[in-house]
Amino acid sequence: MIEIKFWGRGGQGAVTAAELLAVAVSMGGKSSQAFPFFGVERRGAPVKSFCLVDDKPIRIHQIVYEPDHVVILDASLIGRPDILEGFKKKGTVIVNTSKPKSQIKLKVKNLFVVDATGIALKNLGRPIVNTAMLGAFIKATGIVPLESVKEAIKERFPAPLAEKNIKAIEECYNGTK
Amino acid sequence: MKKTVEVSIAIAEAVKNCEPDVVACYPITPSTHIAETLAKFYADGELKSFIATESEFASISAICGASAAGGRAFSATSSQGLALMHEVVYAAAGMRLPIVMVVGNRALSAPLNIWCDQQDSVAERDSGWIQLYCESAQEGVDTAIQAFKIAESTLLPVMVGVDGFYLTHTVEQVEVPTVEEVRKFLPKFQPKVKLDPENPISMGEYATPEYYQGFREDVHRDQLAAKSRIVEVDKEFEQVFGRSHGGLAQGYRLEDADYVFAGMGSVIGNAKEVVDELRAKGKKVGVLKIRSLRPFPGEEVRKLLEGKKHVAIFEKSYSLGSFAPVYADVINSLYPLRKRPVVSSFIGGLGGKDVPTKTVHEVFKMIKKREPLEIWI
């Protein structure tokens, strides 16, 4: 089982990111589960969400303690002592930031960065980075084909909004370093 | 076709496909997306009626009225909402109204907490309602559909417990039967007795000491008689949909097990995962899932647990000042046995405290000895 943890702030769409990933994974025939860390979400407050991926049906219902991958939608959360709690060293961390990788203070071997806020503002006109960050996540991990995420987006959003999100995803996919 | 969707939304769709005549819900916290989604179905013209009530007390009162008038009626609630319904919960059972309610199991105040446990519905366990608890998303969807058939054929209201957040707010793969498919399983509701201006009757009448106890005893006897009906309905469901969920209680790798994890709701999935891991190491361990808390399957539990060494019961509620409720029922069920297994009670998951596979492994280490434990994990 692959366990993915999303960190964000209320309003950035961390919960939806996990959901969209779960939908995309299931389109490829695998099992998935997405759930929010059960908090009292407020705009701006730190939010966690999780996505599980497996080849066989998923029976467990619990918090993710040892994520394989961590996706950080807001770089201001990096100072938290628990940001990489339980993180499996072989995994991948993806950070939304306009800074270069060398300036990110995380001791991680597989670190990827992308300016998802810039890309979201350009394509969506709003700093909602969840969909864009899925592009970065796929580039970094290859867990699902990009096409599946696009399909999930088309299912979730009405046509003009879906197109804008897909553009942001593609741009993030290509811009992830 | 399986779809990847939030479980509350899937349950709402399943309920819609049971073609209820009246749905009444108080639509905001502590309610789940079940109410919100049913309201949307009504707005889109896919549901006959949706009453957004001013309180949960009004919701259950409305569906009692609808059911008394011969309609198929549904509500969904959680936590404080169910507590507010309490008075009418008893009335619904006493009036033999076959209403169905899905409870997203969540903690009760105080302290204020919105997270998962089963204290809310377990607090209603003596009301006369049938209570079924679900392990998975699919079981939640399927049990909501089964509940109408059980209720309408036993004239007992049915409460379906789905763990708050762990099930209600989780997105996973579920199959939601269509209206046409549900029609193959669930016949139209044909009430034996109903309120009718042409033929006036009273329901929930005044019963003097001479009569009152007899009515309560009837509900109890019919609860016991409903045990076979719950099993039958699960089998009938399997014939149509190819899925069943264990009737009243079900073992998993239990036959030759010495050690048993038991409980209700989503913790069962975690326990099954741990059992597979321990079995791979040669440990003789299994799971007992209690699906029906009321009626309680005493005989079935006794048969399934006879000869076991140690049973660990995971509990998401407690009868403060006494014992954990499932534990107490299991102990009572085992009493007639000459040689009884040791039974321990592990109270965990109150107010959303996680009971992950790691904790289930720790519990396994604790039950190696033959001494009964009560531990708040």
Image: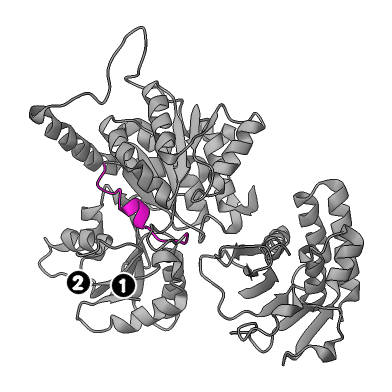
* Label 1 vs label 2, nearer the camera: 1
What residue appears at the point 37 percent right and 31 percent down from the top-left corner?
B152
* Residue B11 pos. (x, y %): 53, 45
Residue B346 tag number? 1
Q: Does the magenta stretch include residue B125?
A: yes
Q: Is residue B15 magenta?
A: no
The CA distance from mark 1 to mark 2 is 16 Å
B326 and B276: which one is in front? Answer: B326
Placement of A69 over or under B225, stated as above or below: below
Bounds of the magenta segment:
B114-127
* Residue B197 found in image quarter: top left
Q: What element carries label 1?
A: strand
Q: With A28 as the anchor, is B200 left or right in this view? A: left
The chief SS type of the magenta part is loop
Instruction: For the residues labelled 1 and 2, say whether their Cβ atoms are less than 8 Å apart.
Output: no
Residue under label 2, please give it.
B341
* Kind of residue indicated by mark 1: Phe
Residue B157 in percent (x, y) is at 34, 37
The spot of residue B26 in percent (x, y) is 49, 40
Residue B4's disc is: none
Left or right position of A63 against A133:
left
Mark 2 closeness class: few <14, some 14–19, many ≥20 residues within 10 Å? many
